[in-house]
Image (spheres, rainbow, N blue to C red):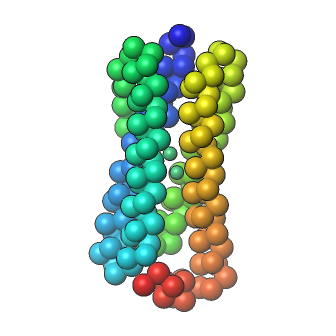
Amino acid sequence: MSSEIITTLNARLSEEIVAIIQYTTHSACAENWGLPILAKYLMDTAKVEMGHSHELMDRIFALDEVPVVTLGEVKIGKDVKEIVHLSAEAEEEAIEHYNESIIQAHDLKDNSSKKIFESNELDEQKHYDFWEAEEYKIDQMGLELFLSTLI
Ligand SMILES: [Fe+2]
Ligand SMILES: [Fe+2]
């Protein structure tokens, strides 16, 4: 298998690890601010990202390689509005990167990697839709009313 796909698998893995750190930290923030519903959603999402990272690592192991994680910037929001925005932004980027990876895996005829990228991309799409809807609610309801729905 080409080293190109290993580089891509490691790049997506590194982004998933950053997402896990970001969601886990944001979950702790939400918990601390007395927002258990948001805290739970953030933690549940971190677990989905953990599943993605395992899929990517299993594929790397199947190709007789060892995962190489290079951590990018972990962006932590200072309030709920920022958390929602940063989450939407991260998911949008994840979708873009997975779509590029799907094309690359297709070109390299690596169907197993392609399937993992596709499956992860579908989850990121769901995550993005959720955060996009939350951003819309904040805009429409105002932050105070929105927060009252999260208690
Ligand atoms: Fe993910
Ligand atoms: Fe996600």
Residue that protrudes farthest toward the top in the picture: 1
| The C terminus, quarter of image | bottom left
Residue 116, by quadrant, is top right
Residue depicted at x 58% and y 24%:
112
Q: Position of residue 93 (x, y in %)?
A: 59, 46
Along the viewing direction, whichever of 118 and 146 lies nearer the viewer: 118
Give the vertical position of 145 relative to 36 (above or below).
Answer: below
Residue depicted at x 56% and y 26%:
113
Q: Position of residue 70 (x, y in %)?
A: 37, 32
Give the vertical position of 129 relative to 33 (above or below).
Answer: above
Residue depicted at x 66% and y 73%:
136
Figure label count: 0
Q: Is residue 23 visible?
A: yes
Q: Is residue 93 visible?
A: no
Q: Position of residue 34 (x, y in %)?
A: 34, 81
Residue 54, by quadrant, is top left
Along the viewing direction, whichever of 74 and 148 lies nearer the viewer: 148
Q: Position of residue 134 (x, y in %)?
A: 59, 71
Give the vertical position of 15 relative to 104 (above or below).
Answer: below
Locate residue 102 relative to residue 64 in the image: left or right: right
Residue depicted at x 64% and y 41%:
96
